[in-house]
Amino acid sequence: MSTKEQIEELKNAEDLLIVAHNYQIGDIQDLADFIGDSFGLAQKVNELDVTNIIFCGVDFMAESAAILNPEKRIILPDLTAECPMAAMVDIDELRGYKEKNPKTAVVSYVNTNAETKAESDVCCTSSNAVKVVKSLDNQKVLFLPDKNLGHYIKRFVHDKEVDVWDGFCATHDKILPDDLRRSMEEHPDAEVVVHPECRPEVVDMADYVESTAGILERAKRTKADEMIIGTEKEMGYRLKKEVPDKKYYFPADPTCTNMKKITLESVLESIKTKEPVVGVDEEVAGKAVEPLRRMVEIGRG
């Protein structure tokens, strides 16, 4: 029996569900009970009526799920599946900024660790970042850690001063204007849709800017037969599966190696052992839960 078949057999007999981010490999997407972006997964885990959730993503996503659902076992098959961008926030530097700017609202992208969320007023995802910042009464906002998403927010928020942290997603940041331009020349009829974590000059070249959930919805709506997609290449698997009548091109072949640390073998082991469970310090979780809840309440953009 293959690893995939063993997972199918075991998961159907257990009190558990598998959720997976859009950047997971195709085999894991096939096994997942729910696939989504950061926002969709945060909502879905909250709704699931099971004890054990195998979370196929990276550390900050599983932490968020654990904070919002302390009564559930959130199991991350490989604890080394970390988000480098989340690690770009120095917590002492953030606390120092807050001391100097006490009236500034701290908006943290969901791509941050629990300690950063605990120092924040509200969290957001790429799909609702603009909406979250606009909802605040504060005249000054610190957005962290993704400078590219921060600059994207500033395009739409003109009545506030928005400070932007100097972090970035290496996967999206590696998509360069020349890569996109080359793909556009090769596929002149293709619609161009990029993630807001891309560089501002790449965003300038796109027809649409969307989260991964938004990219999927755009693919379902557009009349274009071809799409150039500016995000992690595994998104192509879901697109081809759910909207198979189009062609998709991924400039620079962007890959998140940390997402790929979740393997069929590690998922199978997690189902068997119900480990490793993601733990968050109780005090930190208590402070981080409200910013996350506000994110969910505000909803998508």
Image: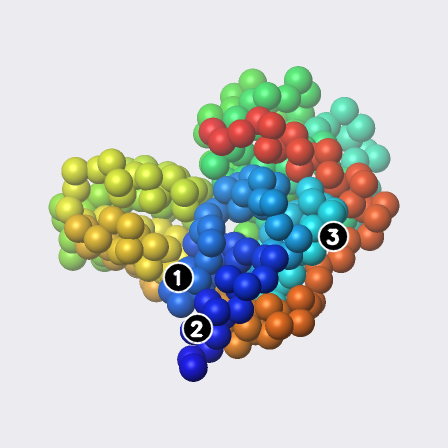
Judging by the rendered image, the residue that carries numbered circle 3 is: 90
- The kind of residue on which mark 3 rests is Asp
Which mark's residue is nearer the viewer, 3 or 2? 2
Tell me the CA gap for discs 2 and 1. 9 Å
Towards the viewer: 112 or 68: 68
Please state the horizontal and vertical placement of residue 38, each as a whole percent of the image: 53, 46
Q: Colour scheme in the image?
A: rainbow
What residue is drawn where x is 82% and y is 52%? 281
Q: Earlier in the sequence, mark 3 or mark 2?
A: 2
Q: CA distance from mark 1 to mark 3?
A: 37 Å
User: Which residue in the protein does label 1 denote?
Assistant: 30
| Numbered badge on residue 280 | none
SS assignment at label 3: loop
Q: Residue at x 80, y 39 (%)?
A: 287
Residue at image point 16% right, 38% down: 223
Three-letter amino acid code at the position of disc 1:
Asp
Q: Nearer the viewer, residue 258 or 10?
A: 10
Disc 2 residue crowd, few under 14, some 14–19, many 20+, Cα 10 Å? some
The residue beneath circle 2 is: 4
Question: In 3D space, how far apart are the residues under numbered discs 3 and 2 (Cα atoms)?
Answer: 40 Å
Identify which amino acid the numbered label 2 is placed on: Lys
**Could you tell whether 115 is left or right of 221 in the image?**
right
* Residues under numbered marks 3 and 2 in contact, where contact means CB atoms less than 8 Å apart: no
Considering only order in the chain, which callout, 3 or 1, is on the residue closer to the N terminus?
A: 1
Whether 300 is drawn above or below 6: the answer is above
Residue 104 percent location from the top left of the image: 72, 28
Q: Is disc 2 in contact with disc 1, using a CB cutoff of under 8 Å?
A: yes
